[in-house]
Image (cartoon, grey):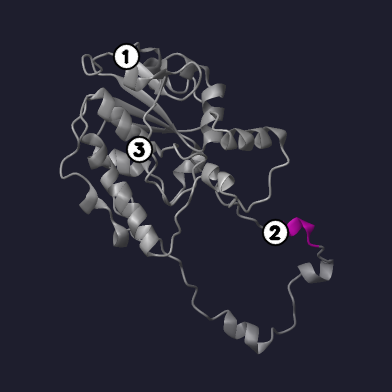
Amino acid sequence: AEQSPKAFHCHDMSECPVSGDAASPSTEEEPAGFADLSELPVEVSERRPTCLHCYRPEKVCLCPFLPADPLEVSTCLYIVQHPAEESRVLRTVPLLAACLPKGKCKVLVGRRFNEERHPELASVCKDSHTLILYPGSDAENLEELDKDFTTPPHNVIIIDGTWSQAKDIFLRNSIFRLPKQVQLNSATCSQYVIRTQPTNMCLSTLECAAVTLSIMERNQAIPEVLLRPLQALCSFQLQHGAQVHHSKEHLLKSGLYDKPMPRNKRKIKRMQKLLTNQNI
């Protein structure tokens, strides 16, 4: 569910016309005011200290809301993360990783993945005990699979990014068509209310992982443990000025969508699907 990193603009000095006289050292004295400015100390902006466990700023550390001990699971998660998601302040994957044992939540950042550059991921995709969580007409409902996923342990690949980013990653990387494709059919509204989702039923990556693990591990207590830090994150942000974000579906149906309608035919079609409750 998610904007590309901020662009930093710089002026190209080669475009500025500089005469030969201006380029040579000046023999005139600089005005006194400018000379004084050169003596002022330069302030270096420092990043806020970050907790090395939850990766939140120390002043808003979420470690008190994490489980005292990592949640024991047999399933291994592979989070395929779009590069734009890595730089977001309010991302949920670090919280997910902090709740699970080391080695049970592996994050791979990128847009393109192949066997040559990502041999471990390619091997996992070829494994018959690997699932990829991505909705679609070819996906089976995970809740309806009558299978013991703990013997042997299974792997689950989850794509982390906006819907358009996730779709691009899934379609442009053939290795992701190798595992069994599954989707969640649980009618659950997202608790990640500080970020806009396309539809009312869209979940954050952490929420998807929580539901998936609860099914595969047959442990209904897992969502409560994994969602606790997410709830704390949202609560803190709302207390400090953040607004509740309704889904685009909700805004369109209630007439509250105040942005200009897209001109792109593909985006218009997507908006129409939101209004008619069709899968996007």
Q: Name the residue tied to disc 1.
A: 129
Measured along the vertical axis of the image, is residue 59 above or below residue 192? below
Q: Residue 207, labelled with which disc?
A: 3
Element at label 1: loop
**Badge 1: residue crowd in 10 Å (few <14, some 14–19, many ≥20):** some
Indicate the quadrant where residue 130 lies: top left
Measured along the vertical axis of the image, is residue 106 above or below residue 1? above
Indicate the quadrant where residue 185 lies: top left
Q: Amino acid at mark 2?
A: His
Q: Amino acid at mark 3?
A: Glu
Q: Residue 11, labelled with which disc?
A: 2
Looking at the rendered image, the disc whose residue lies closer to the viewer, 2 or 1, is 1
Q: Distance of mark 1 from mark 3, alpha carbons?
A: 22 Å
Q: Distance of mark 2 from mark 1, alpha carbons?
A: 53 Å
Query: In percent of the image, x 45 and y 13: which residue is there?
Result: 178
Measured along the vertical axis of the image, is residue 64 above or below residue 264? below
Q: Is residue 62 left or right of residue 36?
A: left
**Badge 2: residue crowd in 10 Å (few <14, some 14–19, many ≥20):** few
Where are the magenta residues, as a range?
A: 12-16
**Badge 3: residue crowd in 10 Å (few <14, some 14–19, many ≥20):** many
